[in-house]
Structures are given as structure tokens and as C-alpha cells.
Image (cartoon, rainbow, N blue to C red):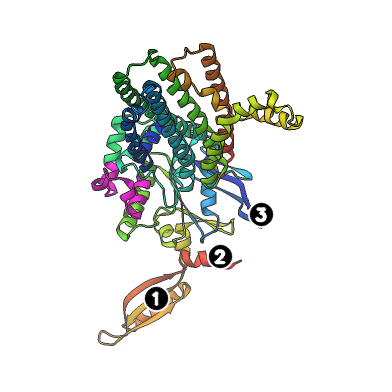
Amino acid sequence: MSHPLELSSVSKQYVSRKHRVDAVREVSFAVAAGEIFGFLGPNGAGKSTTIKIIMNLIRADRGTATIFGTPSTKAETRRHVGFLPENPALYDYMTGAEYLRFVGNVHGMPKQRIRQRSDELLMLLDLLPAAKRAIRSYSKGMLQKLGLAQAIIHDPPVLILDEPMSGLDPLSRVLVKELIVNEKKNGKTVFFSTHIISDVERVCDRVGIIRNGILKAVKEVAPLLREGIEAYRVRFAEHESSAEQEIMVSPDDLTTQMVAITSTGGTIRLLEPVRKNLEDFFLHIIRED
Amino acid sequence: MKNILRITILGIMRDRVFHGITVAALVFGLVPVISQLSMRQVTELALTLSLSLTSFLLLLLSVFLGGVSLWKDIDRRYAYSILGLPLRRSDYVLGKYLGIVSFILLTATVLGIVGALFSYSAIGVYPPNRPVLWENYVYAIFFDVLKYALLVSFAFLFSTISTSFFLPMFGAVCIFFVGSSSQEAYNYVNSPEAAALHPAAKSAITALYYVLPNFGAFDFKTNAIYSIPMDYQGLMLTFVYFCCYVSIVLGLAVILFNRRQL
């Protein structure tokens, strides 16, 4: 069975009079159904170019991008996709409600369903009070949330989000993360690009790290975090009345140390794993170059 | 395509350019007054003013809307969001084009009625020797709309290859001037006055005449102003010419836009 999203050896070179830039080189990966895939990389790594190729905004020089097995150059594939561009630009003379109605109409949704979904999403994303205001009066965060609403109004099986948390305040970031996780719970596939590592740690099943147009690694996030325990921070007191001490213990020595402390009447006050996080992994990959 | 057409019209209605042109249309109020200045040709002058003013406002609309509409979508990245929807690029281009042309047709209808009312009031005071053929007046405006629809298609063609608004905007203006004088240039090179002209220059001008649009073919104002009966075969030929020409230009625009990297 074909994957919701698959890229095979996709390459793209930007050519100007003076320079040739390999924006994306031989990028291949597949995103499984119901998976949240984070596409991580520093600025200029090729994340947006890859997404533009998937959305047929630009053409790959080589390779193919497919949505459920159909080349993404076909307009009908976008019926299955909800797309949020980076810093979305939406027709600013329309109101938020009008824009959602327009997108619903393009997707061929029945009028009643459009109204119901619009109200639902505007409420969820806290945009209801601004629904009848022109988009030109929206703040950056509101625009981002409206962009997200228009991406999911038709309840697509695949979501492609370019920097979905960009420009959002902390509360809205949490809201959007919850929304992404909920989409996964509903069986949706989410592919999103970001350069914020904690976003990937919190919500992603897998992460692809891109640098200079080359996909350096594709890893599952959970094992990466689990296997990354380098040591344990142990805080203990030798006696009830004595001062707390802190030591770092390697995973191999943990049992021995615990036994040593407790056998002499000491009390363990804190036991905390010190893990190599995704940031370290990311930096390791990036610094390999 | 229908959805793009609809929001294009909505966008124009809410645009400042449209508001400016609406204000400019108030000049129609001067038609009866100015017409009175010509004691013997009130009817002709009233109709000339109405048709010319309508045509001028349609020209402004065509150049501004045609030149800016597609370019602005690309420049301000509205196209990213729109083309992320299940829409073919051809539907997007044609939807926008038809939106603008529908708006031009609507404006022409409104301006035509307003112009006719003001002209009628001027004519009422000084009845003409020959009855006004209002049917010709309608034809003159309708073919003016076709002329500007053709001009908008050129603005779209330029927008598909341009990264700034200069080419679509000024390209459309140039096409308008060249297209408006191509018939005269052709008539000149084929007249005895052009006998001294180098044959190569004659051939070049003739070739350009066939390649560039001939806006003179769409001008039926004289028939409307002087109540000259219409040549219906000529009207039909002009209509067919419009259909063929606009199909070619829009076809090219769609091909180029399909290849465009956004």
C-alpha cells in the first residue's frame, strides 16, 4: 500500500547568473499513515524547498513526490492534503469566515458542513471574535491560526505544515501542538517543518534532519530520547540530619551505587536521568559537516 | 474556477482602485452640460463623451486590474495558499481572468446605462435630426469590453513571466497604443503615400499587423454616434477574431504559468 507521503530521490537546484545552489539533493523518505513526521533543519537547509516541491509550487529537477502513490504534481492529490505555508499570506480583503468558506467551497464541501466546521475551528483556535473582521487586521499569530484552520477545514488525511508554530505566543503554541497530536489520534498523517527542536520532541514520532539540502538522518524520536540516557543525577543524604549531596552515576553503576548508599543508612532524595536530548543529536548531525 | 472568479470580483469591489474609478465616473454628470456647448451637434457630442468616458474608465480598469491582479498574488505570496488547494493552475489563471472580465463587463453595463441616461437627457433638450440607434450604442460598448478583455489577457501573459508589475502594467499600455494604431499603420503602408517606403519595412509592418492585436477592429463608436447602420458580418468577424486571439494569448499565459516556479 502506498504511503500518504513519499519522496524518492528528489533534487532541486536553483540557478542564477552567478550561482548554482543545490537546495535539495537526493532526498528520499516516506511518511507512514497516522505518523507525525518532523522535518528539522537550520534556516536555509532546504525544508521549505522540499515542501514547495511536495505542493507543486516548484518542480523538482529529479525525483518524485507522491501523495498516496499519485505524483503530487496532480492537482487532485491536494484534495487529501491540508497545507499551511510558512508565514501564510491569505487574501487580506476577505474576512476569516469568508476565507474558510472559500476554501471549503474549493474542496467541494457542502455549505452546511462548511459552516459547522468553520464555527468549530474558529472557536477552537480562538478566532471567533475576529471571524467577521478583514484578514488585513489580523495579527501574525491570528493569521497563522487561520492558516491552520483553512488547512484542516476539509478534514484531510494528510497535513503538510511549514513552520506551524512560527509567530505564535506560548499559549497558541500549546494549542497548535495539541491540535497536531489530536489529528494523529484521529488517524491523520502530519508532516511539518520546523527549526525548533522542542516542538519535535513533544509531538513527533519520527524526525528527518536536513542540512545543506541533504537529508542527514531519519530517526524515531522516542527511542532517541530513551536510549539517550547518559547518566543519573542522584541526590542523597547519609543520615536524616546530614546535608544533601549530589553525584552523577553512569547507568552501569546505578544499581551498585544505590545499594552502597542505602546499605549505610543513607536516603535517596532524588533520582533523575540525564539524557542526551534531540538537541544534542541534532547538533551532532549538524556538526558532522 | 468559479470560486476564484467569485473572490476575484469580491477583491476588486473592496479594492481602492475600484473606489477611485467609481469617483471618476461622477464625471458623467458633466455630459449634459458640456453637450450643450455644441449647439448643432448635441446628440453626437453627448454620445461621444459618454462612449469615450466609458472607454477610458474601462481602459484604466483593464490596465490596473489586469496588470496587478496576478502579479500581486505571486508577489504577496497569496498564490502559495491558493495553489495549495486542489486547483489546477490553469483554473486559477482563467478564474482570475474571467473575474476581471466579468467585472469589466459589469462596469461597462453600469457606465453604459448611466451614460445613456445622461446622453438622453441632453438629447431631450435638442432633439437630433437622425434618430439615435441605441442598439449601436450597446454594440459599441460591448465591443469595447471585448477589446479590453483582450488587453487584460496580454497583461496576464506578461504577469506570468514577470517578477515586477512594470512589465504587465506598462506592457499592457504599450500593447494598447500599438494595437490602437496598427490598423492605421497597415492602411498607410498599403497606400500610395507609402510608395517610397522600403519593401522590407513594409513587410515588417505588415507582419506586425498580423501578429499584434488590432484594437481598431473593435471600434464601433462612429456607428453609434452618427447612427450608421451596423455591418453584422463585420461584427461577427470581429467577435471570431477576438475569440481566436484571446484563446491564443490565454493559452500561452497558462502554459507559462504552469512552468513558473513560485
User: Residue at 62% of width from left, 44% of height from top?
Assistant: A63
Tell me the quarter of the picture where residue B233 sits.
top right
Q: Secondary structure at mark 3?
A: loop
Instruction: Find the residue positioned furthest to the front.
Output: B39
Instruction: Find the residue positioned furthest to the left.
Output: A129
Q: Secondary structure at mark 1?
A: strand
Q: Judge left or right: residue A115 versus residue B60.
A: left
Q: Nearer the viewer, mark 1 or mark 3?
A: 3
Where is mark 2, residue-wise?
Answer: A286
Placement of the C terminus of chain A among the 4 image quadrants? bottom right
Q: Nearer the viewer, mark 2 or mark 1?
A: 2
Whichever of callouts 3 and 2 sits on the residue coming sooner in the sequence is 3
Q: Judge left or right: residue B123 versus residue B171.
A: left
Mark 1 and mark 3 in contact? Answer it, CB < 8 Å.
no
Q: Which residues are magenta?
A: A120-149
Circle 1 packing at 10 Å, graded few (<14), some (14-19), many (20+), is some
Label 2 marks which chain's residue?
A: A
Whichever of callouts 1 and 3 sits on the residue coming sooner in the sequence is 3
Label 1 marks which chain's residue?
A: A
Q: Amino acid at mark 1?
A: Arg
Residue A111 appears in the figure: yes
Tell me the quarter of the picture where residue B134 sits.
top left
Q: Are marks 3 and 2 on the same chain?
A: yes
Measured in 3D between alpha carbons, the distance from the residue under mark 1 to the one under mark 3, in whole angstroms, is 57 Å
Residue A72 appears in the figure: no
Where is mark 1, residue-wise?
Answer: A233
Mark 2 and mark 1 in contact? Answer it, CB < 8 Å.
no
**Which disc number belongs to residue A17?**
3
User: Residue at 64% of width from left, 45% of height from top?
Assistant: A61
Q: Amino acid at mark 2?
A: Ile
Q: Secondary structure at mark 2?
A: helix
